[in-house]
Amino acid sequence: MERTWRWFGKKDPVTLAMLRQIGVEGIVTALHDVPNGEIWTDEDVRELKNFIAVNGLHWSVVESLPVAEAIKYGGKERDRLIENYKISLANLGKNGVKTVCYNFMPVIDWIRTDLRHTWPDGSSSLYFSKARFAYFDCCILQRAGAENDYSAAEMQQVRELDKTITRQEKDELVYSIIVKTQGFVNGNIRESDQNPVALFKSLLSLYDGIDKAALRANMQYFLAHIMPVCDRFDINMTVHPDDPPFPVLGLPRIVTGEADIDWLLSAVDNPHNGLAFCAGSLSAGLHNEVLALAEKYLKRIHFVHLRSTDVLPNGDFIEASHLEGRGRLVKLVELFERHAPASLPMRIDHGRNMLDDEQKNYNPGYSFSGRMHALAQVMGIAAAVRELAAEESPV
Ligand code: DNO
C-alpha cells in the first residue's frame, strides 16, 4: 500500500514538510475553496499539484470531488452539474491525479454526536450516541414521524435527556452533528451559516418522495455519464461508504453493506467504478464483517481508509484504537499488503486527540499526533507482513 495522508491544503497547520518526516508518500486532498458543483480548472489543479510536488510529495488521491446535491436527488440542474463534474475529472486526469473519492450520501456526510469523548488515558475520540442523535432528530429538528425510527428504550432516553439538557448542550449537539463535521469536508452547512437547523430542514425536504430505488437510479445515471471520462483518463472513482452505515433521518442510504456494494458495482460494471474501503464506516454496522467484504471486493478497491470502531450494546459506536475493534486492521493490512498492488493508496482515518492535539484546533478526527501514532502502528504491521511474506517465498 502507498502511505497517504489527508491534508487540507495550504491553510492546514500540518505542513507537507512534517508529513515527509513521518513516512507519508502521497497526499489526499481537494480544492477545498471551490464551491460544490463548480468546475475545478486545469490551472487550479496544476497549481496545487505542483505545490505538493515542490514539497517533495505527490497528489495521490482527491478526497472529495463532491457530488452536488441536485445530482443526488435528480434535480433539473443535474445534467449541467454532471457536465461540470466531467470537466473537473478531465482536468484532474490531464494532471495525472487519477484516484477520486466521493460519496453519495444525501444531505449529510459523516455523522458524530460527540467530538471529544474522553478515554481513561486522557486522550479523546469521536463518538456516536444513538440517544443523542434521536434527541437531535425528534426534539431539535422535530422531523415528522421521527419517533417511529427509534426503539421504545431510545425514546425513553430522549425524554429523560429532554428534562435535563441545557440550551448550550443543544447548541453543541447541533454544532457537532451538522456544522463542525460538515464544513471542512465541503458539506452543505458552513460555520458562517446563521440558522443551520432551518437550512438543514430545507435540505432534507429536497428528498421528500425519494426512496432507495430513486437514489440508486440517480447514482447509476451519474456514474454511467462520467465513466467515459474515467475510461479516457484512467481515473478510478471510489465511493465512500455511508457513515454510519444504517438509515438516518428518514433518508435513503446507498452504500451500507454487501447488498448495496453488489448493486453498485454491477449497476455500472466498469473497473473504474470502485470503492473507497473505509473500514471504520463499515465496521460501525453490526451487519458488516469488514474482512470478508475486503476479500470479496478486493479488485474493485482503489483506496483504503484505515480506522476501527466498537459497537456498544446500546447501538452507540466509538472510534476504537487502530489495533483493535471491529475494523480488523491487522488482517486488512495483511490482505492488502499480500494481495493488492503496492501502489494502492491507504490513509489513516480519524486519529485520537492526544498530546498537544487539543490545543491545535485540528478538524475533528484529523489530529496530527493521533494520526501519526496510528500510521506508525499500521506501518509496523505492514513491515511485519512483508517480512513474513519474504520468508515464505524467498527469491
Ligand atoms: C470523514 C470522511 C468523509 C469522507 C467523504 C468522502 O471523516 O471520511 O467526509 O471524506 O464522505 O466523500
Image: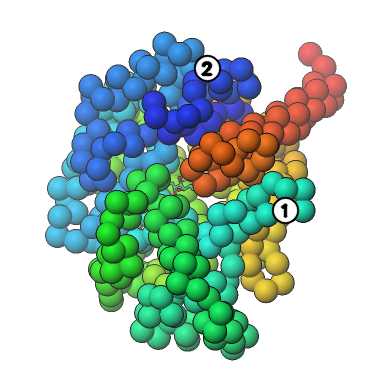
Q: Is residue 269 visible?
A: no
- Residue 39: image x %, image y %? 21, 36
Question: Where residue 119 is drawn, which disc sits there?
Answer: 1
Q: Which residue is more in the foreground, 183 or 268?
A: 183
Mark 2 — residue?
A: 17
Count of numbered marks? 2
Q: Nearer the viewer, mark 1 or mark 2?
A: 1
* Residue at disc 2, secondary structure: helix
User: On the rendered structure, is 343 left or right of 195?
Assistant: right
**Residue 31 placement (x, y as % from top left):** 32, 33
The amino acid beneath tag 2 is: Ala
- Which x, y percent locates residue 311? 68, 63
As helix, strand or loop, the secondary structure at mark 1 comes to loop
Describe residue 42's horizontal placement relative to residue 341 as left or right. left
Instruction: Identify which residue is drawn at 64% across, 71% down.
Output: 315
Measure how far apart labels 1 and 2 are at the Cα level. Answer: 31 Å
The disc, 1 or 2, on the residue closer to the chain's N-terminal end is 2
| Above or below for 354 versus 124 | above
Q: Is residue 109 visible?
A: yes
Q: Quadrant of residue 95?
A: top left
Amino acid beneath label 1: Trp
